[in-house]
Image (cartoon, rainbow, N blue to C red):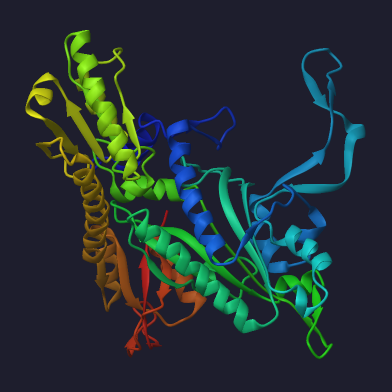
Amino acid sequence: MKENYSQWYNDLVVKADLAENSAVRGCMVIKPYGYAIWEKMQAELDRMFKETGHVNAYFPLFIPKSFFSKEADHVEGFAKECAVVTHYRLKNAPDGKGVVVDPAAKLEEELIVRPTSETIIWNTYKNWIQSWRDLPILCNQWANVVRWEMRTRLFLRTAEFLWQEGHTAHATKQEAIDETFKMVNVYASFAENFMAMPVIKGHKSANERFAGALDTLCIEALMQDGKTLQAGTSHFLGQNFAKAFDVKFADKEGKLEYVWATSWGVSTRLMGALVMAHSDDNGLVLPPKLAPFQVVIVPIYKKDDQLKGISEKVAEIEKQLKAEGISVKYDDSDAKKPGWKFAEYELKGVPVRLAIGPRDLENGTVEVARRDTLTKEVVNIEGIEKYVAGLLEKIQDGIYQKALDFRDKHITSVDTWDEFKDVLANKGGFISAHWDDSPETEQKIKDETKATIRCIPFDAVEEKGKCIYSGKPSNKRVLFGIAY
């Protein structure tokens, strides 16, 4: 990990059976173990969305190209990443070898493979909205999107990825702004309470804002190599898309007004964040709340009659653990030895491992191993379910605290350009510095150092100072970093 973080990450994603590269360049196959983690994320987020009044829908994968030309900033932001469908049929090649595109099957209007759904959704909302009684609309969809990335990395940046995208419509500006903040807070709660990953909430600078948004809110996390990761965004779109697609409603006085909009999303990039925030040279370290199974039980035996006695006891333990809401896997397969199983489940980040052999049966004990600290102890089988339940809570809290301590140690305040470059080169992390609020200065800093403004924190205090680059006046610090 310290020698080559990038290679460590790539190897771990593959060896832990999370994902692998596919036959399609830049796309990935999410393997069952990786998808089980994503399903857990999806289930919790879906529950949180529905608790805040949102409902799920589904919109088309294909978007007419003309839709993108209706919102200038939006098309400029996504034009270089769009995959375009031009034909709808193949035919046999003239030489009989393979197939070719049938030139007679050219589409009248080319279609964009969904990079994001604002345009197709706002074209739809025009049919749904006539009166203030039709508002708000609080829709979310779980979908795949395509953004034609040239440099890809499993989970972090792929040409196709899975995500959710919320798209809401409101009668007033304030309702839309409140929604934007509400959803970034949902994301932060999920990241911290389930992923055990501390995040900083804030506004994006104009340069980093979503294409077509008036304001973008974000959660930013720090990875163990000192780079920052944008883990989720929530956008206040104003009336831009309503005006582009002529979506108006009659207010209570009968006056026609344009609708106010938001959009917000997180993706399978969270899987990459989970790996990089917590894992080590032994493999994944999974927070118990997102582990496909929280406990694995491995029997230690030499004879079949020993296995039979162990399995009877394990059946009791499993029942007790499941009664506590704990997910369990009993690995009694004889294809691999216990030592191999120990290493495999360590690699896969299973939070707790129980090992039980004939001597444990005699003594009424079981060996308990923690993945986060790599420590082991022998405890009584009596009451094991309460012990493990408490241990899983400690592990969840401990993983979060470790990440928080690391993050806090890597937030550095600087006041000069030389300090800024020194911290960036030798320490990394978030750099708290004054900035003159101009996109031109931010671009120059990026061009010279690759660092960008990750966010303007919600809790940034008013503080007089001078921009580290231009020397012009500044009234608050922002957070810079090198991003994934």
Which residue is depicted at the point 73% across and 60% down?
A: 121
- Residue 94 vs residue 121, the one in the foreground: 121
What percent of the width, then of the height, locates residue 204? Answer: 49, 71
Q: Residue furthest right?
A: 104
What percent of the width, then of the height, locates residue 429? Answer: 29, 61
Residue 304, located in which quarter of the rendered image? top left
Which residue is depicted at the point 29% across and 56% down?
A: 226
Q: Is residue 343 left or right of residue 101?
A: left
What percent of the width, then of the height, locates residue 128? Answer: 80, 66
Q: Is residue 105 visible?
A: yes
Which residue is depicted at the point 7% across and 27% down?
A: 363
What percent of the width, then of the height, locates residue 310? Answer: 21, 21
Q: In what quadrant of the picture does the N terminus appear?
A: top left
Q: Can residue 294 be seen in this view?
A: no
Please tell me whether residue 328 is drawn above or below residue 255 in the rendered image.
above
- Residue 112 vs residue 346, the one in the foreground: 346
- Residue 307 vs residue 398, the one in the foreground: 307
Q: In this view, does 187 lie to the left or right of 327?
A: right
- Residue 288 vs residue 389, the one in the foreground: 389
Which residue is depicted at the point 87% across and 29% down?
A: 102
User: What number of labels is visible?
Assistant: 0
Q: Is residue 312 left or right of residue 91?
A: left
Q: In this view, does 353 lie to the left or right of 138?
A: left
Please tell me whether residue 38 is drawn above or below residue 319 in the rendered image.
below
Please tell me whether residue 305 is drawn above or below residue 271 in the rendered image.
above
Please tell me whether residue 314 is drawn above or below residue 268 in the rendered image.
above
